[in-house]
Amino acid sequence: MRKLVESTLVSLDGVIGSPDRWSPFDNEARKLALETLDRSDALLLGRVTYEFFRANWGAATGDPYIDRINTMPKYVASRSLTETNWNATLLGSDIVREIERLKAQPGKDLIKYGTSRLDDTLLRAHLVDELRLWVMPVVVGSGQRLFEDVDTSSLKLELAAVRRLADASAILTYMPSYAT
């Protein structure tokens, strides 16, 4: 059974929005991100992340990380899109059932980048198996916040691992346990 791993860049003050503008992603972080991606064989994306990635990386080549993302199957949760491209499949209206089906298939992990409104559904249905927060040593001030518009009242997190990076970033890995 596959795991659903959520991996999110977050500033010290809890901002996750527009990390391309503020996250110091050096060679060590790029290497770790590619290793994480290599343990996955599909991406789960909300509409906003899908559209951003496709617009910025869909035609790019020559970078091992972007090349890997471009070739991976992508599953997109959206209420407004009616079609996709870029090796992507729209999930149906029953997102929970579709993700349960994907998780039940053999294969590597499913990876989801960013925290969004989709997480409200994923967490309520107890579908996230691992939460990996890449805490960046910056204070952004404003922007979309971690778990904004997400009900976390039943979510309990156990710290499973901490990895310190040379650039003063830290990767905190949490395993969710869900209160009933």
Image: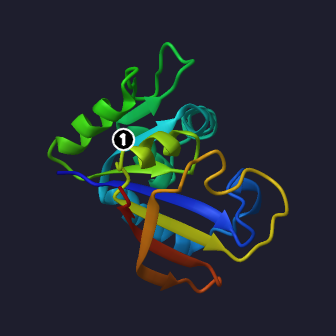
* Horizontal side of residue 63 vs 89, given as left or right: right
* Horizontal side of residue 47 vs 77, given as left or right: right
Q: How is the image coloured?
A: rainbow
Residue 35 percent location from the top left of the image: 38, 66
Residue found farthest to the front: 180
Query: For this rendering, which residue is in front, 38 or 120?
Result: 120
Q: Which residue is mark 1?
A: 72
Three-letter residue code for mark 1 = Met
Hey, which quadrant is residue 70 in on the image? top left
Residue pictured at 53% horizontal, 67% vertical? 133
Does residue 34 lie above or below 135 as drawn? Answer: above
Residue pictured at 60% horizontal, 62% vertical? 9
* Horizontal side of residue 139 vs 166, given as left or right: right
Does residue 33 lie above or below 82 as drawn? Answer: below
Residue 96 percent location from the top left of the image: 35, 34
Residue pictured at 34% horizontal, 48% vertical? 127
- Number of marks in the image? 1
Query: For this rendering, which residue is in front, 142 or 74?
Result: 142
